[in-house]
Image (tube, rainbow, N blue to C red):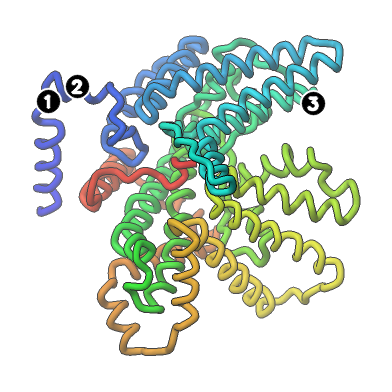
Amino acid sequence: MKALFSIQNWFLENVGNIDLETIKNWFLFNPKQPLLFNSAIFLGFFLVFYIIYILSRKTHYFRITYVVLFSLFFYYKSSGIYFGLLIFSSVVDYVLSRLIYEEAKQGYRKFYMILSLLINLGMLAYFKYTNFFIDNYNSLFDGTMKFEDIILPVGISFYTFQTLSYTIDVYRRELEPTKSFMDFLFFVSFFPQLVAGPIVRASDFIPQIYEKLKLTKEDFNRALFLIIGGLIKKAVISDYISSNFVDRVFDAPNSYTAFENLMASYGYAIQIYCDFSGYSDIAIGLALLMGFWLPDNFRTPYQSGSITEFWRRWHISLSSWLRDYLYITLGGNRKGKIRTYFNLFMTMLLGGLWHGASWKFVVWGVLHGLALVVEKFFGQFIKLPKNIFVRTIQVVLTFHFVVFCWLFFRAKDFATAFQIADNITKLTFDLNQWQTIILGYKNVFLLIAIGVVWHFVPVKTLAGMQKTFSTLPLVAKAVLLGLIYWVVYATASAGAQPFIYFQF
């Protein structure tokens, strides 16, 4: 009954008092309230969008144009005026890729390819790294250059890599250009994965544009299952442990005990996984509702027995992009062992820098790069037995190395990262203190435990849960989805929280 009253109060507060100003705010960009998958307003927009989308399923051109317009509106509501940058980038890559495809002379083809790289990476460098370069220049040469007032457009790293992969594939003659600019813009701006991935390959996605819309009952049920699971991961688990524990410890690690520093480090590992994999699940589910397949982006990465395996399971669309378009371009493993190690290291270093304009991310990438090199080198000589005991040790060691690296990823600066690491080294077994802390943060620790258990649930168990969900009547599924959104609203301390990877 209490929940019903809360829902009623929310409805009256947010829907019952609609005026022209409220409606106007729905359609105008507000930098303090960007449009997010985990917000109630997105649910409302998507429901209206989806009804029209389904009704237009037999009219290909209208459906494509309609999705493009909604995607641009979604990006405008997420990033404001920078939706124009998305259109500019799309025009550039569409025109240059057509020229590359139609040009017979290799010299001109290479020129157009280099021009695409310069424009795309130039935009990325300007918006993402200008102040980083200014800061380092001032530090090294006692300079007095002023910082530029630059706002990082949401998702620029993702759609830049996506358009680049398209142009590179056309250059390599592995892909034919789209039939029209609208089809290309559909590929680039497709809103489920626009602002935080997965980074979709043109060769995988574009053929789906020309297929008839197919949405089976199984696809529909799987889509809802993914969306509900993604919302729980993001808005219930990740946001709660972040705002109620992890953020507090990382803001002032010396104000907390060694045990709290350790648990905050574990907590962040669960937080970032639930946040990003939750987003990916929602994106894949939304795309599936529209009849499109997006690749998996996570496969229980903390079950990995090595860093090599970790990068086959974590942010798969990025790691495969770096492999195919950077590592292989550098020479891969085709130019001897030393060059292979160098290529691995440089790929991860640049992958770290891709995440953000900070030396913290570079160090994070360097640590992972060194780990990959060490594994590659010693893997030639050491062959470990394959049994559950050895596998368990490998998983535990890999997980703790990943958690250590996350310190540099999450901390506001190097000093904070080293403070947390130093505090953890002072950990002593004090059962009474640990019990007091656990009871004081019982909800946080419960959600961390749920996140860990969820991560290690066997695939067959998840398949069984999805099958059970599929047997529910449609009304029950809709009510469950609405209930999850209400839980998101009820547990949020200050509205829907942005996804971590929005900043990249």
Horizontal placement of 102 versus 94: left or right? right
Q: Can you tell which quarter of the image residue 323 is in?
A: top right
**100, 7: nearer the viewer:** 100
Separation (CA) of disc 3 from disc 2:
48 Å
Q: Circle 2 is placed at which residue position?
A: 23
Name the amino acid type tagged 3. Answer: Arg
Mark 3 residue element: loop
Please name the residue shown 79% across and 26% down the image: 172
**204, 448: nearer the viewer:** 448
Separation (CA) of disc 3 from disc 1:
54 Å
Q: Is residue 292 above or below residue 6?
A: above
Mark 2 residue element: helix
Answer yes or no: is residue 288 visible.
no
Answer yes or no: is residue 9 visible.
yes
Please name the residue shown 36% across and 18% down the image: 52
Nearest to N terminus: mark 3 or mark 1: 1
Separation (CA) of disc 2 from disc 1:
7 Å
Q: Circle 3 is placed at which residue position?
A: 172
Q: Position of residue 132 (x, y in %)?
A: 53, 42
Horizontal placement of 70 versus 441: left or right? right
